[in-house]
Image (tube, helix red, strand yellow):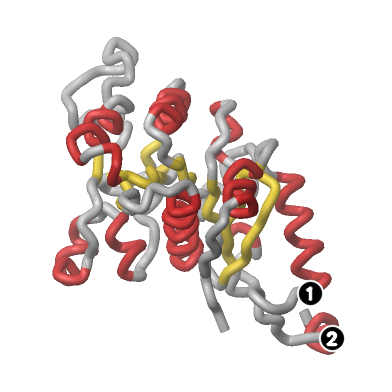
Amino acid sequence: MMEQAKKVCFAHIPHFNSKAQVDLARRVIELAPKGMTKVYFVSGGSVATEMAIKMARQYHLCKGYDTKYRVISFWRGYSGSTIRSMSISGVTHRREDHLPYLLDFPHIEPPYCYRCPLHREYPDCDLYCAYQLETVIKQEGKGSIAAFIAEPILGVGGVIASPNGYYKIIREICDRYDILWIADEEITGFGRTGKNFDVDHWNVCPDIIAMGKGISGGDTPLGGTIIHERIFDTFREADRTGDFMGQT
């Protein structure tokens, strides 16, 4: 860090770059699921989920769907402490004081097999909880839903891990309704579950990964998003341009 500081302390991402940043992005891409080929760094996890939501919105605007802006997430999930990341978070006691500011984003129950909130039992349930995503998409109107975001293993919400097959169904539903799947891997990424990322356990690939914490081991404030090539292609090929994030 001292050697880098001798060269440049900070390069504002929208205008400049640095070799350290490029090298780190390459290393992250080597670890990421196949097809995840672009990285955008920010200062921490909350900003990473903000960034992922902004990217989802930008993606749909590039495709001409200006009504798609809402994000579905888990009750008990936690994705940050900013207003938008709190809106998608589902830890109720952390939301109460801030409800007047929070956005009207829908939530679904997580795949909590130990104490199933839907009163089912795995595996006889046929992963009924996963199809709650499709139910809410239909109820809210598929034309308004931009993305689904979830921690593969809920941390703050109680260390809740998903059963086999859950995210395969989630991937299929997201593809069916043209919504992006954002994997919030701020806690689970970079080897914390025995794979590079937790989604690697399920042989499915999200559209965006939000990352934080593990990437720097707590040595420096750092987070970011990893973007699938097909999402970036939409940005690159679109007639319109948009501002993702300005961070100084």
Q: Amino acid at mark 1?
A: Ser
Image quarter where the C terminus lies is bottom right
Q: Left or right: 118 with respect to 145?
A: left
Q: Left or right: 120 with respect to 231?
A: left
Depth check: 176 or 3 in front?
176
Q: Quadrant of residue 180?
A: top left
**Residue that mark 2 sits on:** 7
Taking the image as drawn, is residue 157 in sight? no
Q: Is residue 24 above or below residue 165?
A: below
Q: Residues within 10 Å of mark 1 (few under 14, many from 20)?
A: some
Q: Quadrant of residue 207?
A: top right
Residue 3, which numbered label? none
Depth check: 130 or 198 in front?
130
The residue drawn where x is 60% and y is 33% is: 200
Camera-nearest label, 1 or 2 = 1
Q: Residues within 10 Å of mark 2 (few under 14, many from 20)?
A: few
Q: Quadrant of residue 99?
A: bottom left
Q: Is residue 44 above or below residue 125?
A: below
Depth check: 59 or 187 in front?
59
**Residue that mark 1 sits on:** 18
**Residue 71 image offset from top left, x and y in percent:** 33, 49
